[in-house]
Image (spheres, rainbow, N blue to C red):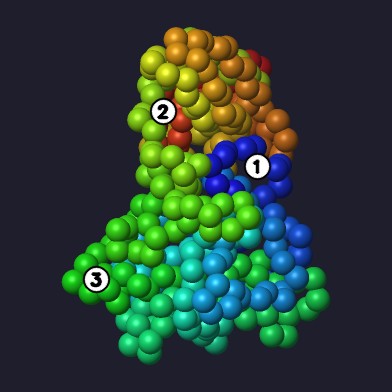
């Protein structure tokens, strides 16, 4: 997971985040299907077999976290705050938190529809709480919410009560939260998170890098391909994640995961340029795309480092009849 962005497989399902009772087949690749998450995913989950074992008290657990906007009118028990910081258990991430003494509760949004919240957990003497999918009575080969386990750090609620309820929507844990550590074999050294990314990272333990400007130019489009140039305009070698999206011509909101057609990570020396070519009509999404062009509709191609940062755009004209 951490510190890298790679191509996602062609088949990654969106699981119903708000209804954690949803069933996912063992081995399926999935992501939380929630429009409040930012769409820059560093990886994906693989559904378990329903027999999920939560970390024991006092142990270190590997976790991940993503940018997420808090919905309006959400219960404080369910809201991410500076004193109530959520993570997903993510073996292999290399990013570690000590769970301390943890309150464990099963939830499927029906029998146990609400999070206990850090106020209750702290009052009962806990450092964290965990939300575990309730797989009782689920058929073999299936699990609710992919057997994902959520870990919520409550130490900020206990140690900084005057700031505990302030909303938190960022990538890196706030100062009030427990310190994280990084290491492939265990919690070897402190985690120094880069807040410019949309997912939890430790930047290999180094200080967050200064932003390096990249210049995008020369967008050329056909019905199937997009090509353009990328230049490192900074004074040091750097990497840029390039994304190509296709949206309807009147799209105004930041496009979601469905609009993403291609992406790659490019590393360039200072002043170096490269020409990039992407196929924008392939796989299952090509059917809808080609049908729209054949029906006389055009589509807009957006190019940039993220859905919220477009550097180039252009229209693909309808297919001639």
| Residue located at (37% from left, 44% from top) | 195
Q: Report the mark closest to the observer, 3 or 2.
A: 3
Q: Which residue in the protein does label 1 denote?
A: 8
Number of numbered discs on residues? 3
Q: Residue 310 carries which label?
A: 2
Q: Residue furthest left?
A: 162
Identify which residue, 67 or 176, lies in the foreground: 176
Q: Which of marks 1 and 2 is in front?
A: 1
Please state which of residues 133 and 223 is positioned toward the viewer in this rendering.
Answer: 133
Residue 115 lies in quadrant: bottom left
Give me the C-alpha separation between circle 3 and circle 2.
39 Å
Q: Residue 194, position in %: x, y?
A: 40, 43
Badge 1 or badge 2: first in the primary sequence? 1
Per the model, the C-alpha gap separating discs 3 and 1 is 39 Å
Q: How far apart are marks 1 and 2 (CA)?
A: 21 Å
Mark 2 closeness class: few <14, some 14–19, many ≥20 residues within 10 Å: some
Query: Which residue: 52% across, 83% down?
Result: 104
- 12 in relation to 305, above or below: below
Which quadrant, please, contains the C terminus?
A: top right
**Is label 1 in a helix, a strand or a loop?**
loop
Image x and y of residue 247, in percent: 51, 33
Q: Determine the secondary structure under disc 3.
A: loop
Q: Tell me which label, 3 or 2, sits earlier in the chain.
A: 3
Q: Which mark is residue 160?
A: 3
Dot 3, how many residues are within 10 Å of its Cα: few (below 14), some (14-19), or many (20+)?
some
Q: Report the residue at 41% width, 47% height from top.
A: 193
């Amino acid at each position: 997971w951490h510190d890298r962005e790679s191509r996602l497989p062609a088949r990654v399902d969106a699981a119903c985040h708000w209804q954690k009772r949803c069933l996912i087949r063992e081995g399926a690749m999935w992501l939380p299907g929630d429009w409040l998450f930012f769409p820059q995913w560093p990886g994906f989950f693989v559904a378990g077999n329903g027999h999920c074992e939560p970390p024991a008290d006092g142990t270190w657990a590997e976790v991940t976290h993503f940018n997420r906007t808090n919905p309006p009118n959400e219960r404080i028990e369910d809201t991410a705050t500076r004193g109530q910081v959520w993570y997903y258990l993510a073996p292999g991430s290399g990013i570690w938190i000590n769970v301390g003494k943890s309150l464990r509760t099963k939830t499927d949004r029906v029998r146990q529809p609400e999070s206990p919240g850090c106020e209750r957990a702290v009052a009962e003497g806990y450092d964290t709480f965990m939300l575990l999918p309730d797989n009782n009575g689920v058929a073999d080969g299936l699990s609710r919410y992919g057997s994902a386990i959520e870990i919520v750090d409550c130490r900020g609620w206990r140690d900084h009560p005057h700031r505990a309820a302030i909303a938190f929507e960022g990538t890196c844990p706030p100062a009030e939260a427990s310190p994280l550590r990084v290491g492939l074999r265990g919690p070897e050294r402190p985690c120094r998170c880069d807040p410019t990314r949309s997912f939890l990272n430790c930047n290999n333990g180094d200080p967050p890098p200064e932003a390096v400007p990249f210049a995008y130019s020369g967008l050329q489009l056909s019905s199937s391909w997009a090509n353009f140039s990328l230049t490192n305009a900074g004074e040091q070698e750097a990497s840029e994640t390039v994304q190509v999206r296709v949206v309807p011509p009147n799209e105004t909101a930041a496009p979601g995961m469905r609009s993403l057609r291609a992406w790659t990570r490019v590393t360039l020396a200072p002043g170096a340029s490269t020409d990039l070519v992407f196929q924008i009509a392939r796989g299952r999404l090509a059917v809808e795309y080609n049908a729209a062009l054949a029906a006389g509709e055009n589509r807009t191609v957006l190019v940039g480092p993220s859905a919220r940062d477009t550097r180039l755009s252009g229209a693909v004209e309808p297919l001639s009849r």
